[in-house]
Amino acid sequence: MNIQNDKSIHFAPLQGHTDHFYRNVHNEIFGGIDTYYTPFVRLEKGDTYRPREIRDINPENNTVEHLIPQLIASTGEELKKISALFIEKGYKEADINMGCPFPMIARRHKGSGILAHHDEVKALLDTVNVIPELRFSLKIRLGWDSPEEAINLISLINDSNISHLCVHARLGKQQYGGETDLDSFEKIYNASSHPLFYNGDVKTIEDIDNIFNRFPNLKGVTIGRGLLSNPALAMEYKSGSELSVSDKKKKMRLFHDTLFQHYSDFLQGEKQILDKMKAFWEYLSPELEKRTRKKIEKANKLNNYDAAVSLAFSQWGKVAKVEDNQDSEDFI
């Protein structure tokens, strides 16, 4: 194992998953993260904000040591207005999202949908220069339709006043499917003058090592779904060893139960709590026994959910597979 403790691990935000409750509890129980990011804040009609986005960035709701709020915008005016909110909340840093792959967002020339529009990207990056109160970073994809979109922006990005660049090595139109394109990422790696972070399909310690071995001058990696699948991943990488099955099971149970309590105290009614906790399992332990996962997904009462979760944790570390009417056990 090639442990490089000078490399940073950042936790990429995922809408609907990594809210302040999740971030705080993850940091408390697992840690290993140098920087957390909030899901992006957007400007709504009438220059308003969604209450949950305001709540999520409020400093009093966040206990992690280093948190950077993220914004998404298509114009300099939008960027200025959202930046003013961040400054009002006391933040000194902000991350600009030019990577979101959702078509509804991209069609509005936001997220990865802006990458094919050189002048619009330039307008956003020029705006950074007139907001000295914030230190901006940038998250992009390889483009929407073609890696040439991002590659053609590198000289513009190099000239911008950003602290670092994070690149998800996929196209926007791929969303989260298909292969990452390391060859196109390498072109950006070789051309970028800013500290660079890699993002995309980082799921294991071996994946992290492979990325750092191929791109040794990276500042770090940014991980999203890999940490939702294995919340211990950054901690394991930083410590240089994987948790035992028993220790991981204990930490995961504590993580789940603590998060459940926070959502129960905040949300109203069983349905809201169940919807939030079912999202917790969406990426976690993808090899969980299918029937158990179905029990969690179909639970419509908290007592049914509790029973399904107890079953899931009783199976932690083992998955019963039924093949040809015979049971066999495989370790996760």
Image (spheres, grey):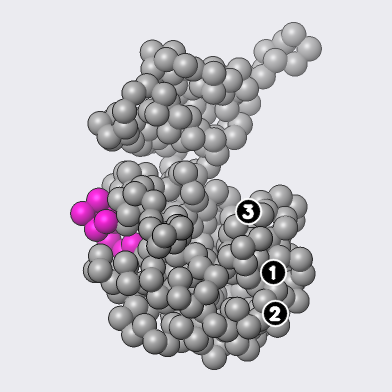
Label 2 SS: helix
Q: Nearer the viewer, residue 325 or 186?
A: 186
**Among numbered discs 2 and 1, the one appearing first in the sequence:** 1
* Residue 331 placement (x, y as % from top left): 59, 29
Q: Is residue 140 above or below residue 24?
A: below
Residue to which mark 3 is pinned: 104
Label 3 SS: helix
Amino acid at circle 2: Ile
Disc marking residue 143: 1
What separation in Å lies between label 3 and label 2 (alpha carbons)?
24 Å
Say whether marks 2 and 1 touch (CB < 8 Å). Answer: yes
Say whether marks 3 and 2 touch (CB < 8 Å). Answer: no
Amino acid at circle 1: Gly
- Residue at (71% x, 65% y) in the render: 144
* Residue 221 placement (x, y as % from top left): 52, 65
Residue farthest to the left? 60
- Residue at (58% x, 20% y) in the render: 294
**Among numbered discs 3 and 2, the one appearing first in the sequence:** 3
